[in-house]
Image: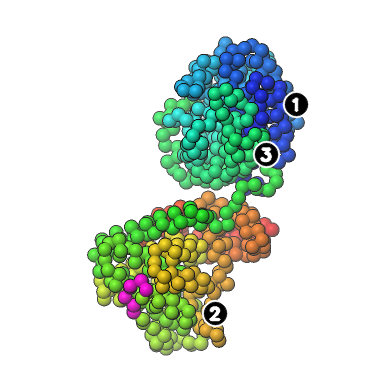
Amino acid sequence: MNYGFVKVAAAIPHVQVADCFYNIQQIEGLMRKASEEGVQIIAFPELSVTSYTCLDLFAQQALLYNAQQALLQLIDKTKELALLTIVGCPLVTENRLINAAVVFQQGKILGVVPKTYLPNYKEFQEQRWFTSANDLNNDAILINNETYPLGRHLIFGQDDIKIGIEICEDLWVPIPPSCGLAMQGANLLFNISASNELIGKHHYLRSLITQQSARCLAGYIYASAGFGESSTDLVFAGNGIIAENGNILNESERFCMDEQLIISEIDIQNLQNDRLINTSFMQGIAELSQKSCTVIPVKLRGFSGNLTRAVDPHPFTPAGDALKERCEEIFHIQVAGLAKRIRHAHAKTAVVGISGGLDSTLALLVTVMTFDALNMPRNQITGITMPGFGTTGRTYNNAVNLIRSLGVTLKEISIKYACIQHFKDIEHDIDTHDVTYENSQARERTQILMDVANQENGLVIGTGDLSELALGWATYNGDHMSMYGVNGSIPKTLVKYLVEWVAYNKVDDASRHTLLDIVDTPISPELIPADENGNIKQKTEDLVGPYELHDFFLYHFLRFGSCPSKIYYLAQIAFNGTYDKITIKKWLSVFFRRFFQQQFKRSCLPDGPKVGSISLSPRGDWRMPSDAMATLWLKELEGIS
């Protein structure tokens, strides 16, 4: 299976001005190279058969005649290739010259798309030679005594793959033709261009491409003229850019004097999923006043080879400066949400249960920042540590030290004696370390927090994160419940980086030391007694699986609605060398079983701010029956190897 991927390429050939037969040799070479790489669709720059910078030579019959002959020769010489190709060439129709994108495959022209918006300002003077698509009367063009479809409203399609084309300046106008093409089904948008370089222009161009791919929920493949174009007045850097829904997947080296072939894969399934769930995508099509597009069938070669695009194993955590920016923005969102709730409830304090683990630490940091933002003293926050049967010295000391160093009021309330009495009351053997033994402790802690909050006219701040909610790794009406949950949209893999970011950017040395040790502590609910050396015995990831895997599964399942086999395929690529196929399949099966079985806990979550693109709030992003079956998902997973 290709899982919806289409392999595309932006090609930048070396050209010579007005030397058509030299130019098609270079184009042919890149076509053959692309075919060997498994490319299914390739685009070449605007007017690449002649070169863009011919100027008044476009009025010469010798150039126009030989351009057509060179085009036909190129099509014939590559007729054994299944590659769908888009090249730029000047063509004559209705006694007028058009700047055209010619689409051909296996020796046949499939259609011709003329440029719509002709720049005629500053260094551009295209209206001197060419006619806009809007000014043409016919929807067919005669080439070498054969008639082919002509127009800006052509879409080339096969099954779910629909290809729309625009040319250079078309992208720069307020409503590009690609907007209408996308709303009529095109999910792969190609732009063949010849845009010269100016200071700052490249940055603006990249933003246009990424924004258009995002606005149209499409793949956007941009191929622009490079070295070999005339430098009489202008310089062309050779921009090849492949973007998908706001993200650049691959791009060329600028000012390279060699030919370039930029390849990546567009995920059509993900794009179509986004269009389905974004119910406003088709709104406004009437305002475009665009006639219906003509769909021209194509037959693409099958997807082959491995993915060249990267598959991020940690989709919730960007790298470098982007991670720092994300951490800061997340805290702003969490603080704003909690501040509003505290003001609305007229709360005098906030109560946070501190275990010495990552989640409760993050909740405490958010609460501290919120009180600072509201100009409320930190000592009005009550941090409660509640040692139990599994509490280790490391987590206990970290909890106490952090509460003190942050200037929060410390309360220590052991749950041991209350739980022992509870076990007697319900006649449970204290040496039986089962789910009753564990959940009794979690509920006892929640009762303490709730009652203290009542005493102090405060709010209990929830600590549970998105990953725990996905797996149902929370005690129902225990740590599952709070008065406001600040971490409910934060995946476990991101919690660590948020705490680390605060350690290095927001606190004193004592707090930093404690926070960094918390980051290094194994994740555990600490509900089972420690081992003989006093170390954590109950490690969450030994029981439910690595959180980095589950966060990966969760992202692709919820963000794109991906099927189990596709998630499994992508996980093998993302975690190559870290987890083998058997391990990935095992924990993916656990993920689906737990996700479906534990929905009842998510159906009654406390309020909390949505932070990222994925949330499990029953009032917002995720509404699912609590008794839905995982049968289809597990059955598909069982059938793959």
Mark nearer the N terminus (2 vs 3): 3
Hey, which quadrant is residue 383 in on the image?
bottom left
Q: Position of residue 504 (x, y in %)?
A: 44, 64
**Residues at marks 3 and 1, CA–CA distance in whole angstroms:** 18 Å
Residue 77, disc:
1
Does dot 2 land on a helix, a strand or a loop?
loop
Q: Please tell me whether residue 242 is drawn above or below residue 471 in the rendered image.
A: above
Q: Amino acid at mark 3?
A: Val
Q: Position of residue 606 (x, y in %)?
A: 37, 64
User: Which residue occupies 64% across, 63% down?
Assistant: 579
User: Which residue occupies 28% across, 71% down?
Assistant: 380
Q: In the shown orientation, is residue 498 left or right of residue 222? A: left
Q: Which residue is mark 2?
A: 537
Span of residues in magenta? 405-411
Q: Which residue is mark 3?
A: 39
**Residues at marks 2 and 3, CA–CA distance in whole angstroms:** 52 Å
Is 410 colored magenta in this rendering? Answer: yes
